C-alpha cells in the first residue's frame, strides 16, 4: 500500500474515532446519575469482595 493511501485511511479512521468519542461524551452528559440504591449496592459488593479475598490472619502459635 502506498504511503499516501495508508495516511489517508489513517486520517479517515481517526476522524471516525473522534466522532464516536464526541458522541459518547454527549450521551454520557445527558444520562442521569446513578440512583443512590445502585451506588450503595455496588459499594457493598466491593466491600464484600475485598473481605472474602483478604488474606486470613495466621493461626496463633502455642
Image: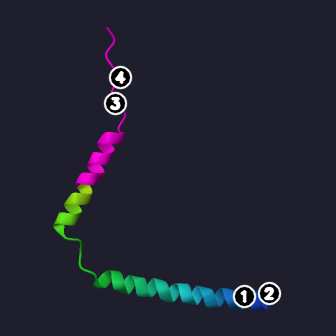
Q: Is residue 36 above or below residue 5?
A: above
Span highlighted in magenta in the image: 44-62
Q: Secondary structure at mark 1?
A: helix
Q: Answer with left or right where residue 22 lies relative to residue 37.
A: right
Q: Badge 1: how crowded within 10 Å, few (<14), some, or many (20+)?
A: few
State the image coordinates of residue 28 (x, y, percent, origin top left): 34, 80
Q: Quadrant of residue 7?
A: bottom right
Residue under the point 74% across and 87% down: 6
Q: Answer with left or right where residue 25 lies relative to residue 3.
A: left
Mark 3 vs mark 4, CA separation in Å: 6 Å
State the image coordinates of residue 22 (x, y, percent, origin top left): 44, 86
User: Contact (CB < 8 A) between labels 3 and 4?
Assistant: yes
Q: List the residue tagged with mark 1.
A: 7
Q: Earlier in the sequence, mark 1 or mark 3?
A: 1
Q: List the residue tagged with mark 4.
A: 58
Q: List the residue tagged with mark 3.
A: 56
Q: Is residue 59 magenta?
A: yes
Identify the image's colour scheme: rainbow, by chain, secondary structure or one colour.
rainbow
Residue under the point 70% across and 91% down: 8
State the image coordinates of residue 60 (x, y, percent, origin top left): 31, 16
Quarter occupied by the N terminus: bottom right
Q: Earlier in the sequence, mark 3 or mark 2?
A: 2
Disc marking residue 3: 2
Residue under the point 47% across and 83% down: 21
Q: Is residue 51 magenta?
A: yes
Q: Badge 4: how crowded within 10 Å, few (<14), some, or many (20+)?
A: few
Amino acid at each position: 500500500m502506498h504511503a499516501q493511501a495508508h495516511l489517508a485511511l489513517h486520517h479517515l479512521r481517526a476522524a471516525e474515532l473522534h466522532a464516536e468519542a464526541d458522541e459518547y461524551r454527549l450521551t454520557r452528559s445527558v444520562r442521569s446519575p446513578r440512583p443512590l440504591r445502585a451506588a450503595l449496592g455496588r459499594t457493598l459488593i466491593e466491600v464484600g469482595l475485598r473481605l472474602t479475598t483478604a488474606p486470613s490472619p495466621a493461626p496463633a502459635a502455642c
